[in-house]
Each structure stands twice: as structure tokens, then as C-alpha cells.
Image: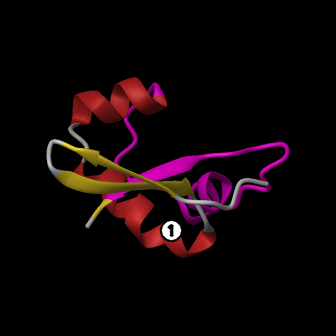
Amino acid sequence: MITANLHVTVAGELVTIRPICMTDVAMEAEFVRKLSPQTRHYRFFGGVRELSPAQLKLFCEVDGRHSMAFVATVQ
């Protein structure tokens, strides 16, 4: 399992790239809500407005062996 964070500077901003975790559920839900309708359609292949609790758990509860997802955050 990958546990280390990667810190990079992009356009003068410090960006942290790290594995997603269950404490990111609210951040992930907000991210999806703020996507444009077209982007949500392309990302989820349908008219998703927001993710269900089960979908959020699926996206954020990764084991690092069979599934993995990363988030990039800006300070």
C-alpha cells in the first residue's frame, strides 16, 4: 500500500498528491457536486448529480492492493 505523500509545485502552488481515504468522503462529495453537468456526464456516463453514501465509500475506501485512488490538494 502506498502511504507516502508527494509534494510538488505547480504554477507556484504547493500541491500534495496522496492516496484517498475515508476521511476524504466530504471532500469527494463536494468535488462531484461542483463539477459541471457535462463533466459529471463524462466522468460517470450519466446524469449523476451527487454520489450516494455507497458510491462515496466505494471511491474512498481503497485497500491499496486491489484498488487505489489518489487526490491532489492545494494548500
Q: Which residue is at a point 43% across and 59% down the rendered structure image?
A: 28
Q: Which residues are magenta?
A: 45-73
Q: Secondary structure at mark 1?
A: helix
Compared across the picture, whether 69 is left or right of 48 comes to right
Q: Is residue 54 above or below residue 41?
A: below
x, y (%) of residue 10?
24, 43
Q: Which residue is at a point 46% across and 25% down the rendered structure image?
A: 45
Extreme residue in the bottom direction? 23
Q: How many neighbours does mark 1 have within 10 angstroms: few (below 14), some (14-19), or many (20 or more)?
A: some
The residue closer to the viewer here, 55 or 63, is 63
Asked if the magenta segment contains residue 69, the reply would be: yes
The residue closer to the viewer here, 66 or 42, is 66
x, y (%) of residue 70?
54, 48
- The answer to which image quadrant residue 57 occupies is bottom right
Q: Is residue 28 above or below residue 64?
A: below
The residue closer to the viewer here, 46 or 30, is 30
Which color scheme did the rendering employ for the protein? secondary structure
Residue on which the image places disc 1 = 25
Extreme residue in the right direction? 65
In the picture, which quadrant includes the N terminus? bottom right
Amino acid found under the numbered disc labelled 1: Val
Asked if the magenta segment contains residue 66, the reply would be: yes
In the picture, which quadrant includes the C terminus? bottom left
Q: Which residue is at a point 75% across and 44% down the rendered structure image?
A: 67
x, y (%) of residue 37?
24, 35
Q: Which residue is at a point 42% across and 30% down the rendered structure image?
A: 43
Compared across the picture, whether 59 is left or right of 25 comes to right
x, y (%) of residue 5?
54, 59
The residue closer to the viewer here, 2 or 33, is 2
Extreme residue in the left direction? 12
